[in-house]
Amino acid sequence: MSMKRGDSCKADRRLRAPRGARRNARGVSLIEVLVSVVVLSIGLLGVAAMQSIALRGGQSSFESSQAVIQTSAILEAMRANRINAAAYNTAGMVCAAPGGGSLAQEDVGDWITSMKTTIGADADDPTVCGQITGCPAACVITVQWDDSRAGGENTRQVVTRTTI
C-alpha cells in the first residue's frame, strides 16, 4: 500500500488536539492547582489547631501531675514527723510560704515554694496555694492553681484524703 504525500499530514492532524482545546487545558490545570493549594492550606490550618489544643491539654496534665507529686511530698514529710503531724494543719489556703521555727512550718513553707516553682509561672505566683486540714486523724490536702494558661478552668484543685 502506498501513501500519498498528503496522507501523513492528515493523520497527524487527526491526532492533534484543536487549538482552542489546548488553551482551555492550560487554564483548567492552573485552576486545579489553585484549588489543591486552598484545600491543602485548610488541612494544614486544621492540623495546627489540633496541635495547639494538644499542647494546652499536655500543659494541664503536667500541672495536675505536679500537684499530685507535691501532695505526696508533703505527706511524706508529715509521715517523717508523725509526732507533730497536727502542726502541719493550716488556717485556710496558704498562698505565701510561711516562715517559722518549727520543722512543720519549715516543711509547709518548702512545700508551698516547691509548688509555686513546679506548677506556677514562678516562685511568686499568687495563684498557687495549698491547704492541710484534719491531721493527724484524716488529713485533707488541697492544692489549688490557675489553669487558664492551659485552656482549662480558672481555678483547679487536687484534693487528697489520707491518714498518717
Image (spheres, rainbow, N blue to C red):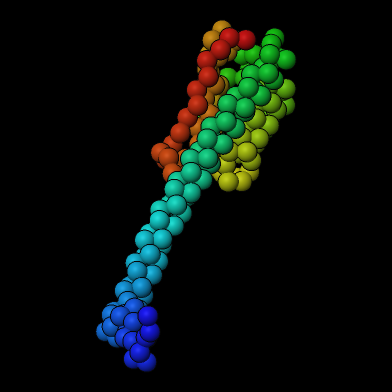
| Residue projecting furthest to the top | 137
Q: Position of residue 23 (x, y in %)?
A: 31, 83
Q: Position of residue 99 (x, y in %)?
A: 67, 33
Q: Position of residue 4 (x, y in %)?
A: 35, 89
**Residue toward you, 100 or 16:** 16
State the quadrant of the N terminus.
Answer: bottom left
Determine the residue positioned at 37% across, 86% down: 3
Answer above or below: position of 20 versus 57: below
**Residue toward you, 129 or 1:** 1
**Residue toward you, 103 or 122:** 122
Determine the residue positioned at 52% across, 35% down: 61
**Residue toward you, 98 or 127:** 127
Where residue 5 sits, quadrant-wise, is bottom left
Q: Position of residue 80 (x, y in %)?
A: 72, 15
Q: Is residue 28 visible?
A: yes
Determine the residue positioned at 70% across, 9% down: 83
Answer above or below: position of 20 versus 138: below
Q: How many marks?
A: 0
Q: Is residue 97 visible?
A: no
State the quadrant of the C terminus.
Answer: top right
Answer above or below: position of 42 versus 115: below
